[in-house]
Image (cartoon, rainbow, N blue to C red):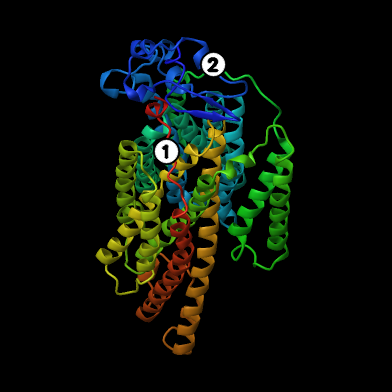
C-alpha cells in the first residue's frame, strides 16, 4: 500500500515523533498525484512503534472496502468522499440515533409500562439503570477501542445494545425490565463513543466540523421525534415496540459497519487496567446515584447519600494515583495536559447540565402553565432544537471552510446564559411566542457548542487517544446532565412546595386550602383542568416560581462556559495541506 493510501490527511504527533500522513479522501487527490510527489512508497507511511496512524480514510476507501469506488485513496475529483466512506458515516449516524432515541421513546411509554407490569415505586430505576451503566461504561469503551481496534469494539457495543433492547421488550416484570435496561445501557455507552472515535479517525479535523454538525442534527431529530414515535408505537403496537424498534435500525447499522468499514487489525497491547476501571466505575456510579437520589428517594443528609458521596470522593481521589502507575491507564491523564482539552471537558459538563435540565423543565412549564398537551412534548421543544440544529450545522461547515473555531465557543458561552436568564423571567402571563423566542436564544447558544466541543477535544490529543478523548468528552456531558437534572429538580420541587404551602396558609381552611397543600409538584395539563380555579391558579404561579429558580441556577452555572471559552487557544485543525 502506498504512502498516500495508508493515511488520512491528519498529522499525528507521538512522543517526540511526528508521523506525516498523506492526503485524505476529502482532499480529492488521486493516488497518482500522491505518488508523483516523489515520496517513496511503503516505509514512509509505516507506523511508529505503538502508534496508530490515521487508518480509516485509507482502509474504508481502499479496494477491499470500496466496492468499486475507485483507487485506494478513494477520492474522486472535486473532493467527493468515496461511496464506502459515506456509507460508514451513515451507519455511524444510525448508531447515534439509536443512542439518543431510546430514552426519548421509552419516556412516552412509561405510564403504559407501569400499568401493565406494576412496580410504580421502582419507576425511576428504569431510567436510572440505563443512564448509570451508560455513564460508567463510556470511558471503558473508549479505551478498549484505542487498545484493541474500534471496529470490533463498536460492533460489540451494538450487539449488546440490541440484546438489551430485545430482552427489555420481552420483560415480564419491572425487575426484569430494570435489569435488561442496565444491559442496554452498557451497549449504549459504546455507541456514541464508538461513532465519534471512528469519525475522528475517518475524517481529518479540518473537514470534521460539517459531519459533526450532521450528528448534532441527528440528535435534535431524535429529541423531536422520539416522544412522537414513542406515543404512536405505544398506542398502536404496544409499549414493547418502544424497545423492538431498535432491532431493525441496529441490524442495519451492524450490517453496514461490518461490511463497509475496514480497519487495520490491532494486536492487543498491554493489559486492561482493571483497578482503574473499577475505581472509575465506582466513583461515577456513586456520583450519579447521589445526584439521582439526593432530595428525592433520600434526604441529602441521609446515611445512604452521605455514604455514596464519600465513596465517590474516595474512588475518584484514588483513581489518578492508580492511573499514573499502570502501563495502559483506562483514562490517560496526559490528555488533560492540553489546556484546550481540559477547557472543553468543563464546557461539556456545563452544556450537559444546562441542556438536560432545560429539556426536563421547559415541557413541564409549558404543560402546567401554558396548558400545552403532553402528547406533543417533542414539538414543544422545537424552538430550542431547531436553532440548535441549524447553528450546529452552519458552524460545522464554517469551521471546515475556514479552519477557525475559537469564536464559536465564546458566542455560545455568551448566548446560553442570556437565553437562560430570559427563560427565568417567564411567568403565568408569558405567551408561547415570547417563551419560544427565549428558547431560540438558548438553542442557538447550545448549537455553537454541541459538536464543536468534541472537535476541539479530538484535535487536542494524539491519534492513539482518540477513543479516550471522545469518551471523556461524552462522560463529562453525561455527568453534567445528571447533576443538572438532580439539582434543578431539587430547586424546582422545593420552590413549588413552598409556594403551595404559602397559598394554602393564605387561604386558610376555606376555598380549597387543604387541596392547595396536598397538590403535588408535578401535575399535567389534564389533571390541572379538574382542579378548582383557585387551586389551579396557585399551582401555575408555583410552577412559574419554580421555573424561575431553576433557570436562575442554570444561568449562574452557564457563566462558567463563557469564562472558559475565552481561554481556548486557536490550535490549527490538522489538515493534509498543513503537511506541505
Residue occupying the point 38% across, 59% down: 414
Q: Is residue 116 visible?
A: no
Rendered position, 324 above or below 538 = above
Mark 1 lies on a secondary structure that is loop
Left or right of residue 251: residue 441: left
Res. 286 mark: none
How many neighbours does mark 2 have within 10 angstroms: few (below 14), some (14-19), or many (20 or more)?
some
Check disc 1 and report the residue beneath it: 572
* Closer-to-camera residue (93/266): 266
Q: Is residue 248 visible?
A: yes
Classify residue 312 by image quadrant. bottom right
Percent x, y for residue 288?
Answer: 61, 53
* Closer-to-camera residue (125/214): 214
Percent x, y for residue 12?
Answer: 51, 28
Q: How far apart in space, not on screen, are marks 2 and 1 (Cα)?
A: 24 Å
Rendered position, 12 above or below 107 = above
* Closer-to-camera residue (381/43): 43
* Closer-to-camera residue (13/411): 13
Classify residue 537 by image quadrant. bottom left
Residue occupying the point 56% across, 19% down: 47
Check disc 2 and report the residue beneath it: 46
Rendered position, 128 above or below 65 = below
Mark 2 lies on a secondary structure that is loop
Percent x, y for residue 270?
Answer: 70, 26
How many neighbours does mark 1 have within 10 angstroms: few (below 14), some (14-19), or many (20 or more)?
some
Q: Earlier in the sequence, mark 2 or mark 1?
A: 2
Amino acid at each position: 500500500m502506498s504512502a498516500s493510501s495508508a493515511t488520512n490527511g491528519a498529522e499525528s504527533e507521538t512522543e517526540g515523533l511526528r508521523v506525516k500522513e498523506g492526503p485524505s479522501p476529502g482532499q480529492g487527490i488521486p493516488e497518482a498525484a500522491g505518488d508523483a510527489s516523489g515520496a517513496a512508497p511503503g516505509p514512509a507511511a509505516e507506523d511508529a512503534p505503538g502508534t496508530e496512524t490515521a487508518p480509516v480514510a485509507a482502509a474504508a476507501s481502499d479496494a477491499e472496502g470500496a466496492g468499486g469506488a475507485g483507487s485506494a485513496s478513494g477520492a474522486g475529483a472535486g473532493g467527493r468522499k468515496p461511496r464506502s466512506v459515506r456509507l460508514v458515516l451513515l451507519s455511524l449516524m444510525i448508531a447515534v440515533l439509536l443512542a439518543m432515541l431510546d430514552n426519548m421513546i421509552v419516556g412516552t411509554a412509561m405510564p403504559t409500562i407501569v400499568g401493565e407490569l406494576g412496580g410504580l415505586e421502582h419507576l425511576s430505576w428504569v431510567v436510572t439503570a440505563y443512564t448509570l451503566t451508560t455513564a460508567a461504561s463510556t470511558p471503558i469503551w473508549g479505551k478498549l477501542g484505542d487498545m484493541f481496534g474500534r471496529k470490533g469494539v463498536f460492533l460489540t457495543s451494538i450487539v449488546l445494545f440490541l440484546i438489551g433492547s430485545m430482552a427489555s421488550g420481552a420483560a415480564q416484570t419491572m425487575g426484569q425490565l430494570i435489569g435488561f435496561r442496565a444491559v442496554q445501557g452498557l451497549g449504549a455507552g459504546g455507541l456514541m463513543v464508538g461513532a465519534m472515535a471512528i469519525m475522528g479517525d475517518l475524517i481529518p479535523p479540518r473537514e470534521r466540523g460539517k459531519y459533526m454538525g450532521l450528528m448534532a442534527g441527528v440528535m435534535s431529530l431524535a429529541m423531536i421525534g422520539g416522544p412522537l414515535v414513542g406515543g404512536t408505537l405505544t398506542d398502536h403496537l404496544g409499549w414493547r415496540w418502544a424497545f423492538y424498534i431498535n432491532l431493525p435500525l441496529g441490524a442495519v447499522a451492524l450490517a453496514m459497519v461490518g461490511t463497509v468499514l475496514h480497519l487495520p487489525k490491532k494486536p492487543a497491547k498491554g493489559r486492561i487496567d482493571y483497578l482503574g476501571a473499577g475505581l472509575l466505575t465506582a466513583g461515577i456510579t456513586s456520583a450519579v446515584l447521589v445526584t439521582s437520589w439526593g432530595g428525592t428517594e433520600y434526604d441529602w443528609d441521609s446515611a445512604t447519600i452521605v455514604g455514596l458521596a464519600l465513596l465517590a470522593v474516595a474512588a475518584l481521589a484514588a483513581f489518578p494515583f492508580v492511573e499514573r502507575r499502570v502501563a495502559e491507564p483506562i483514562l490517560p491523564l496526559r490528555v488533560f495536559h492540553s489546556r484546550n482539552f481540559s477547557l472543553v471537558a468543563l464546557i461539556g459538563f456545563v452544556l450537559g447540565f444546562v441542556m438536560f435540565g432545560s429539556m426536563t423543565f421547559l415541557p413541564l412549564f409549558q404543560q402546567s402553565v401554558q396548558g400545552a398537551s403532553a402528547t406533543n412534548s417533542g414539538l414543544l421543544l422545537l424552538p430550542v432544537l431547531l436553532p440548535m440544529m441549524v447553528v450546529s450545522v452552519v458552524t460545522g461547515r464554517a469551521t471546515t471552510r475556514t479552519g477557525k473555531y475559537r469564536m464559536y465557543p465564546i458566542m455560545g458561552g455568551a448566548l446560553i446564559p442570556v437565553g437562560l436568564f430570559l427563560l427565568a423571567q417567564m411567568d403565568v402571563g408569558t405567551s408561547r411566542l415570547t417563551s419560544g423566542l427565549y428558547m431560540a436564544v438558548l438553542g442557538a447558544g447550545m448549537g455553537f457548542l454541541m459538536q464543536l466541543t468534541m472537535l476541539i477535544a479530538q484535535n487536542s490529543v494524539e491519534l492513539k487517544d482518540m477513543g479516550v478523548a471522545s469518551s471523556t468528552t461524552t462522560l463529562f456531558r453525561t455527568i453534567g446532565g445528571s447533576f443538572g437534572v438532580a439539582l434543578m429538580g431539587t430547586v424546582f420541587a422545593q420552590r413549588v412546595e413552598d409556594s403551595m404551602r404559602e397559598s394554602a396558609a393564605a387561604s386558610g381552611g376555606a376555598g380549597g386550602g387543604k387541596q392547595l397543600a396536598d397538590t403535588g409538584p408535578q401535575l399535567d395539563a389534564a389533571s390541572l383542568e379538574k382542579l378548582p380555579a383557585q387551586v389551579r391558579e396557585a399551582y401555575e404561579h408555583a410552577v412559574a416560581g419554580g421555573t424561575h429558580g431553576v433557570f436562575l441556577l442554570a444561568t449562574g452555572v452557564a457563566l462558567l462556559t463563557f469564562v472558559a471559552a475565552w481561554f481556548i487557544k486557536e490550535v490549527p485543525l490538522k489538515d493534509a495541506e498543513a503537511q506541505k
